Image: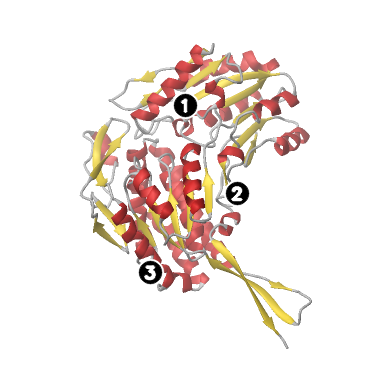
Amino acid sequence: MPHREGERAMSVQRPHIEPGRLFIGGEWRDAESKERRDVIDPSTGKVVTTVAEADGTDLAVAVAAAREAFDAGPWPRTPARERARVLHRVADLVRERADEIAAVESLDVGKPVSFSRGVDVETVAETYEYYSALAQSVDGATREIPLPSHAYTRREPIGVVGAITPFNFPLILSTSKFAPALAAGNTIVHKPADETPLSALLMAEILADAGVPAGVVNVVTGSGPVLGEALLRHPGVDKIAFTGSTRVGRLAASTAGKQLKPVTMELGGNAPHIVFEDADVGKAIGAIIKAFVFNTGQFCMGGPRLLVHRSLYDTTLGILADAVPAVPVGDPFDPATVVGPMAGERHVENVERFVKAAVEDGGRIVVGGERLELNGGYYFKPTVIAGLDNDARTVQEEIFGPVLTVQPFDTEEEAIALANSTPYGLAAGLQTSDLARAHRVAARLDAGIVWVNDWAMLDPAVPFGGVKQSGYGRESGPEALEAYTRTKSVVISLV
């Protein structure tokens, strides 16, 4: 992989990936398609390497490898304790190669390397450790029934899993599928995001080094419309695990539904963040800023809709006007950087369209509102917008960038109504010192996860997923294992 010029390149370790090759059946293979896709460093806009633009033929080879590994290979029949040992070795190898993995993720996605190292890589290691433990608890139960029989259930792996992941958290969102799927004994065909495929290829090598047998994990890079469609339709794929936009998710669910294929969908979000009059404002400001700038706002569980009690509205806007410009924006390989570039030009253009629409709808730019010209990269200044009605497009739709809209409210009932007023329901948060209110409001918010007095408190043991247009099914926690197993009942006559 070519390195960028200058001192910064010294921190980027070259991964053991051959450009233009796929990982299928436990080995690197040339793609049948000779097409290539450039991988762009979003902090400079320059090409760093190329990957294969695989086609349906390549996808079919990968599914065949996964099918054979499931039907005839050792992994589904490996004792759970041994599968657990392999997953634990994955966690160990991830930590051993943490600097390399973090550098590749930052180079590919644009996120600050300190976050890639401390958040993304560590989350991956912890997730494999967590499911290493849970692998040994995938068991059934005996059932007492009035028939003269012995009845029990078995939880069995579901088969070949097609995993489709997005560009914003390639490591974490692939691991949230891989770890429970592997713990249960499944095999996988992974289609990473078109724009950010590098860590998927690197992790395929790490999984193999940890002892995951050949054919159990296969990675095919290329176009979403081509490979995603082929994966959804392929009769050899038993289950789909999808994370992406609501628009694409609808198409994916429809296609998979025609095949009667079970699907889990983690889709878009537009989370409300409520600040009640009894909140600790100083503490709340840190959570507010983190909620909308983390990962440059490219976070489906981010908090881009701030709802503030009217008594604190002007104060909060004033603090944000001073604090937001002080958040360090810049080179993702600078240890001081908090906000890096967006993942690509199209993402910056999308944010620009939303900010323009906000102004046209009467919104006031409190801070930000424009690109930051830096090294040719895809930077956008963290932006705060006030004065919008609740039906404004910039309030109602998912922006997926570092933009925060701020709205006042007067009562708890009004806050809940505003919070629940969009089609999304992935995450929500509230700031309050009233414990009773925290429980009361959390119960009424339409969201798969609710945070109180902080944001993005995530752990492999805590399930997340959406309601309404944010999808269905859960990732993380023991709940995720349910999506990768099927229950079989066995009833034995005793007469």
Marks 3,2: beta carbons within 8 A = no
Secondary structure, mark 2, is loop
318 with respect to 243 (left or right): right
Identify the residue at image location x=75%, y=26%. Answer: 413
Residue, x 52% and y 71% (percent of image)? 81
User: Which of the numbered marks, if any, corresponds to residue 402?
Assistant: 1
Check whether the beta carbons of the residues at disc 2 and disc 1 lie within 8 A of each other.
no
- Does residue 186 appear in the picture of this structure? yes
Left or right side of 254 for 208: left
Q: Earlier in the sequence, mark 3 or mark 2?
A: 3
- Disc number placed over residue 68 in the picture, else none: 3
Disc 1 residue crowd, few under 14, some 14–19, many 20+, Cα 10 Å: many
Image x and y of residue 231, in percent: 40, 53
Cα–Cα gap, marks 1 and 3: 45 Å
Viewer-closest of 30 and 129: 30
Viewer-nearest of discs 1 and 3: 3
The alpha-carbon separation of the residues under discs 3 and 2 comes to 33 Å
Amino acid type, residue under disc 2 in the picture: Val
Q: Nearer the viewer, residue 227 or 178?
A: 227
Task: Give how far apart the Cα atoms at labels 2 and 1 are.
Answer: 26 Å
